[in-house]
Amino acid sequence: MTDARVERRVFLLTRGMRPRRDGLELTYWGWSAEGPVRARLSRQEAVFFVERGVPTEAGRRRAVALTTLTGDDVDAVYFTDRRAMRAEARRLADAGTPAWEADVKPADRVLIKRFVTAGCVVEGPARERGGVLEMDDPTIAPADVAPELRVASFDVEAEGPEGPLISVAIVHRDEERVFVRGAGPPLPGVAYFEHEAEALRAFLAYVAALDPDVLIGWNVIDFDVAYLEARCRANGIRLSLGRGGRRAEVLRGTRDDAPAVARVPGRVVLDGIATMRAATWSFERWSLEHVAQALLGRGKALEPTDDKLAEILRLYREDLPALIEYNLEDCRLVRDLFAEAHVLEFAIERQRLTGLTMDRRAGAVAAFDHLYLPRLHRHGRVAPSVGVRGEPLASPGGHVMDSVPGLHENVLVLDFKSLYPSIIRTFLVDPLGLHVAEEQDEAKSVEGFAGARFSRTDHILPELIERLWAARDEAKREGDAALSRAIKIQMNSFYGVLGTPACRFFDPRLASSITRRGHEILQRSRAWIEERGRTVIYGDTDSLFVLLGAGTSPDEARAVGDALAVGLNRWWRARLSEEHGVDSALELELETHYARFLMPTTRGSAQGSKKRYAGLERAPDGTTRLVIKGLEAVRTDWTPLARDFQRELLRRVFAGEPYEAWIRETTDALFAGALDDRLVYRKRLRRRLDAYAATNAPPHVVAARRLGRDVREIEYVITVRGPQPAGQRTAPLDHQHYLERQLAPVADTVLRFLGTDFMRLGGRQLSLF
């Protein structure tokens, strides 16, 4: 009996590969409206390309109608064994004739060559097995699929990182379950088990029955999944967290800083921290408590303590219902954070856009490959393997102008919208175009920098950016913030990708033709503005700060800014058409009007600083807000007191309010001990404690050593006996230290422009007796 032929619209979740006797088996798990789908492609081959005149010693070789970027004909070489392919690729590299695209994974190549990123139509013989539609050797074609994924948030509590399980909680929407080792009172959704193995098996069985598409958590891979794997191993249990009871595992990279990956067949594991970082969220601290308080206005169901594990163990012994509530609330917080920050929507849109699986923590280079390689193949070319080029040459970064320090009034910020992507579009900067231009007359190319020229007829990246640009504009019109954010991140990553040796298309001429063109645009734009009687006091990469001065009304300021933007855009269109024969995609716009603006000096000098400023932004509706960039008030290595003090001082100065008496009051409160709770430093340790020098160690290391154990982050204070952990202080605080090293520096950043200084207004000298 033959299997019925079925068609499904599928959103891909996970992919995998394993060797078989007759070739490679590629497996793709996905969501469909009718239920989970597993598509298997059998007897597949890995492939790379070699120049036609280069001899090979392994693999099945076939001529193909493709060339290298430099125009040399290539053959494809196929392998049923990836180890044999890697060995042959190493041999070719050692011989000085490296293979092309030898590092592209077969499971990715299948999707890349079909232009499949996330959604696809899968058609072929199918059979239902264990609630999964299994399809063998189906056809796969791209499609637009909007999934409705089933998501569950889970969290583990344990007797230490290597101790036995206490409980594991899981929440799906409003359905809550907790599996506890031990005995306790009857509670809704709570099951108790005498042995750890029983609790683990019950949790895994529940996941299988719930059958979520996505598992979410906080630090969920490095701790929760890794911990479950270890405890299952200790109990002789298979970590059957995957669909159909398939085994899950945590894979760790060879580098210490490489992120761990959870391989769970058929389910995506999304870590809240990693995914929010990928979506450009930023927080002072990434603890669940801090992020939840910032976005949700509530935190964990456990009072802050210096020894969280000790408190968890106490609750386990004395108040088990409170511990269960704590476990559940962690799951709820992650669930609600994902909803509030649209984390899942971002992960979905990023995959639809780039082809990266939703759980990919980083991967700008891989995303570029997924977008660029299939289009390159359509142009009849193949790409180099990663890492075959020689030593990289540095290209300049963004242009940062010298600033005019001072306390200014009415400063406009004119910003080039997505400057680097617009340079790529305008000047046709492109890896393929770079090489094709070498084969063409100069009239058919656009001049770049560092000797580069780019073809006017053969290119990929400019059109790709134009398509993404239009899609982002549409997403903005539709109010699709997740898609808009994903597109912006992807477009802005192109310059960075082309400038890193980890990219197969790396060439210093590409990055230089973007950044040096940016320098030129900023410098010529400044000259144009100043020729019209305006003063530019600062410029950074894609923005120009224009000083209007006192006596300018908000309406007048915005009118001036709009007129400058319109005039400069018109001027660039004319110049670029005349000088380069290209259509300008540059778009300058008025971004901000600062009613008051501080450009500080670098510490200890009269020279204006860079990337550090503060301003009172005035919106078109007349409302204002304080904006601070790079100053101590937004730096986590300063104490809360110093940061709050500088922010309040800036607010008072910008608003024209008195500040002298307030400074003296703050100083008095400091020495009276009223501000002691705001004197805590927080610092991360980049290495193990024993890796730091025994003497002359920095304060945070000295404090951490007093704890007697390695920590990743330390909260400490400065006492009259030196640095001490904040929760284990044995000496009085050194208030003079905080006066001189915290309040005075942040205040003088502002006060120097008001003709005074902090010590004159609020300083104290300790008594000699």
Image: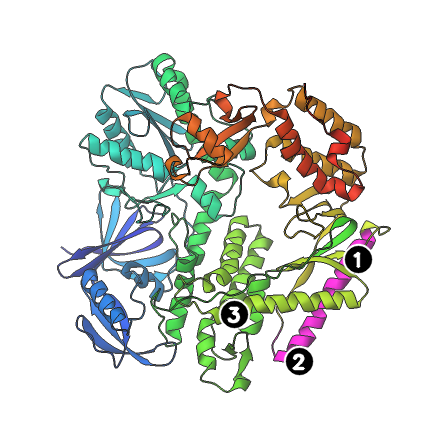
Q: Amino acid at mark 2?
A: Glu
Determine if residue 109 is in view.
yes
Please report contact status of discs 1 and 3: CB closer than 8 Å, yes or no: no
Residue 559: mark in rendering: 1
Q: Amino acid at mark 3?
A: Pro
Secondary element at tag 1: helix
Secondary element at tag 3: helix
In percent of the image, x 70 and y 66: which residue is there?
525
Secondary element at tag 2: helix
CA distance separating discs 1 and 3: 33 Å
- Quarter of the picture containing the N terminus is bottom left
Q: Position of residue 458 (x, y in %)?
A: 47, 78
Q: Nearer the viewer, mark 2 or mark 1?
A: 2
Left or right of 461? Residue 760 is right
Above or below, 749 against 108 in this view is above
What stretch of residues is rendered in magenta? 555-583
Determine if residue 288 is in view.
no
Report the residue marked by disc 3: 462
Q: Position of residue 587 (x, y in %)?
A: 65, 64
State which quadrant residue 758 falls in.
top right
Left or right of 204? Residue 563 is right
State which quadrant residue 9 falls in.
bottom left
Provide the major secondary structure of the magenta segment.
Answer: helix
Report the residue marked by disc 2: 578
Q: Nearer the viewer, mark 3 or mark 2?
A: 2
Q: Amino acid at mark 1?
A: Ala
Circle 2 Cα neighbour tier, 10 Å, few/some/many (<14 / 14–19 / ≥20): few
- Ranked by sequence position, the earlier of labels 1 and 3 is 3
CA distance separating discs 2 and 1: 29 Å
CA distance separating discs 3 and 2: 20 Å
